[in-house]
Amino acid sequence: MVSRSKIIPEKKVKEVEEVAEMLKAYAVVSIANLYKVRAAQLQELKKKLRGNVEIRVTKNTIMLRALEKCEKIKPNINKLREFLKGSNIFLFTNMNPFKLSLFLERNKVKTTAKAGDIAQTDIVIPSGNTGLAPGPVISELNEVGLLTKIETGSVWIARDTVVAKKGETISPKLASVLSRLGIKPIEVGLSITAAYDEGVILTEKDLRIDLQKVIQQIQEAWTGAFNVAVNAAYPSAETAIPLLHIAQSEAFNLALNATYFDSPTISKLIISKAHFEALNLETYLTTVTKQLEKPSNPEEKVQKEESEQK
């Protein structure tokens, strides 16, 4: 038998070389899923990312061969092989991968659901007027679990209803109802499944950041550090003014308690304090005197009253 080696077309060889050069030229390469991404949306992303990110659509087999050519130059880059599944697009950049992932998330759009789509989150149909006239639509709404009523010539949904939970498959009937109600529950756009950043592989889970939570954590950390610095009397640009206020307050209180007359303001306060203490002392002495004047027993009380009457 004569073995025949498979001849690789020159076009593919050239494409492998081009992709390999791009892998060498950029610090970050990301793999994004093209599922449900429309051509118009992709073109818009290319415009927004122009100059910062080079986007390339190529076959997974081409990328595999390109990765093999770079494995000695780029440590761990071969680990991207396990993410080369399905229809992908590749993003080459020197941009921080977290920043790129956040940009792509913010540029996703909502679209109508089709039968067979997977609910990305719980799908809730809110209560209120559907704007639809009574008729066969009532049975369609009831079939997907919606409680309806008729008011002012329109079909109303009686209460907020979860019609599909996250991860469930959207049925043809539900897809039709959602479309009629104008609800677009499916978010489409590029999602990074994995990114290579100078030897480190970041997964989709790694790249998902809750910005509000991060901001809250930073604020809490700053507040905690600030309080520690102030309590430890650690001077810095941030603590200088609060520390001066504390020092001024403590010095003022010390002078007041020590009756140290160093300014008109403290002098007035010391005199006011002395006056207030004198009034308290007067009240206390009056109370004590009255208590001492009281008879110690009932007989003395009677004798005192008789004496006073005489």
Image (spheres, helix red, strand yellow):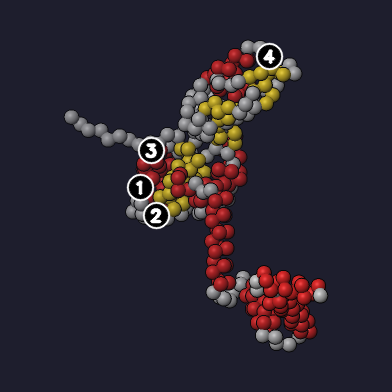
CA gap, disc 3 and disc 4: 55 Å
Q: Amino acid at mark 1?
A: Asn
Residues at marks 2 and 1 touching, judged by CB atoms closer than 8 Å: no
Q: Position of residue 95 (x, y in %)?
A: 52, 53
Q: Position of residue 267 (x, y in %)?
A: 76, 84
Dot 4: element: loop
Is residue 204 rendered to the left or right of residue 130?
Answer: left
For marks 3 and 4, the one nearer the N-term is 3
CA gap, disc 1 and disc 3: 13 Å
Residue occupying the point 54% across, 66% down:
225
CA gap, disc 4 and disc 2: 62 Å
Residue identified by numbered label 3: 61
Residue occupying the point 48% across, 41% down:
32
CA gap, disc 2 and disc 3: 22 Å
Dot 1: element: helix
Dot 3: element: helix
Q: Amino acid at mark 3?
A: Thr
Residues at marks 2 and 3 touching, judged by CB atoms closer than 8 Å: no
Dot 3: within a 10 Å radius of its alpha carbon, few (fewer than 14), some, or many (20 or more) residues?
few
Residue identified by numbered label 4: 134
For marks 4 and 2, the one nearer the N-term is 4
Q: Amino acid at mark 4?
A: Pro
- Asked which quadrant contains residue 158, the reply is top right
Q: How many marks?
A: 4
Residue 78 tag number: 1
Residue 199 tag number: 2
Which dot, 1 or 3, sits closer to the camera? Answer: 1
Q: Quadrant of the N terminus?
A: top left
Dot 2: element: loop
